[in-house]
Amino acid sequence: MQSLKINEINTQINQLIEKKMMRNEPIEGKLSLYRQQASIISRKKEAKAEELQEAKEKLASLEREVSVKTNQTREFDGTEVLKGDEFKRYVSKLRSKSTVFKKKHQIIAEFKAEFGLLQRTEELLKQRHENIQHQLRTIEEKKGISGYSYTQEELERVSALKSEVDEMKGRTLDDMSEMVKKLNSLVSEKKSALAPVIKELRQLRQKCQELTQECDEKKSQYDSCAAGLESNRSKLEQEVRGLHEECLQEESRYHYTNCMIKNLEVQLRRATDEMKAYVSSDQQEKRKAIRQQFTKNIAEQENLGKKLREKQKAVRESHGPNMKQAKMWRDFEQLMECKKQCFLKQQSQTSIGQVIQEGGEDRLIL
């Protein structure tokens, strides 16, 4: 509030200085007007920059607080959850912070737009000031009084600063006292306005506690009833599963019994047919009998076994001579291989030994 008052006072001072300077010479009035506008713009720019910095700091603190609250919420997952008035207060606090954040964000956007506009205005005024300064220097050089404008400008600036400081000192205490009075009256008004609301809030809080207690009781009754119904349902489901399994067992037993009856009927039919064929006087029928077929198969297998035993006996008797003949054949192969090697060595003129033939035998002497 104090910074706003100071800015208002500065604007008023600047307006008075502009009016005063307009009454002077045209050229000097224009120059001082432009200088004054430039100083006003620079002050506004600095004030807006400070307000923007404060808004940025508040925004950063709010963002940090939001991140901290988010981390706390993540850490509190699975722990006790806020209920009743605490949760409502927490929600209202978050809503108020959200609205404050949106307002601050909008203010920052406005500040940025105004800053861009002021920056452009400052550039234009600087260009105009340079042009006017150049014209003023040329005029002073022609008149032979170079440096006069700079000296006058410095004197005006110092006098303006002194008057601003004096007026600011005189008005600051009055503003502060008025501000304190306004704040006290505003606090008393707010207290008187909030008294019925606080009274109504107490009644609503008591009613909320009663409703919460009733809700807890109803919830406990519901939980007990639900637990009883759940236990009954589980028992009924278990009985149904048992009956279903028993039904499946009986059904499988029924199918198994039917299959056994059919198998027995088939076996009984085959036994009856076998008895009829065995008792019949027809030879064709007797040949079709299973007994005759099995008797024939037994006789064939006995003949086959007899032949195999005879063959086994012949193999055993010829096993010794055959093994001897196989050994002689292997010895003959080794002898022929040796003769081949000796012949090859003799052809290559490498005298390793002497082969002597006596009595139909070959002997190698090394």
Image (cartoon, rainbow, N blue to C red):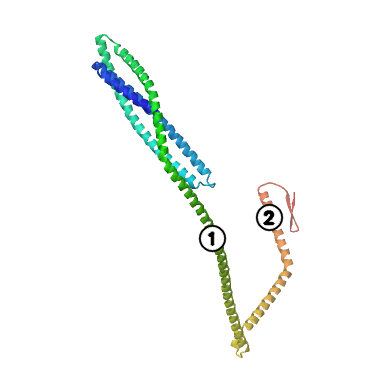
Of tags 2 and 1, the one toward the viewer is 1
Question: Residue at 44% of width from left, 43% of height from top?
Answer: 198
Q: Secondary structure at mark 2?
A: helix
Q: Which residue occupies the foreground of this view, 39 or 147?
A: 39
Q: CA distance from mark 2 to mark 1?
A: 104 Å
Q: Which residue is mark 2?
A: 337
Residue 54 higher or lower than 340, as above or below:
above
Residue 303 higher or lower than 67, as above or below:
below
Who comes first in sequence, dot 2 or dot 1?
1
- Amino acid, disc 1: Cys
Q: Which residue is mark 1?
A: 225
Q: Which mark is residue 235?
A: none
Question: Residue at 56% of width from left, 72% of height from top?
Answer: 247
Q: Which residue occupies the foreground of this view, 93 or 342?
A: 93
The image quarter containing residue 188 is top left
Residue 261 x, y percent position in the rendering: 59, 79
Tell me the quarter of the image containing the N terminus.
top left
Residue 209 x, y percent position in the rendering: 49, 49
- Amino acid, disc 2: Glu
Q: Is residue 340 left or right of residue 22?
A: right
Q: Which residue occupies the foreground of this view, 151 or 277?
A: 151
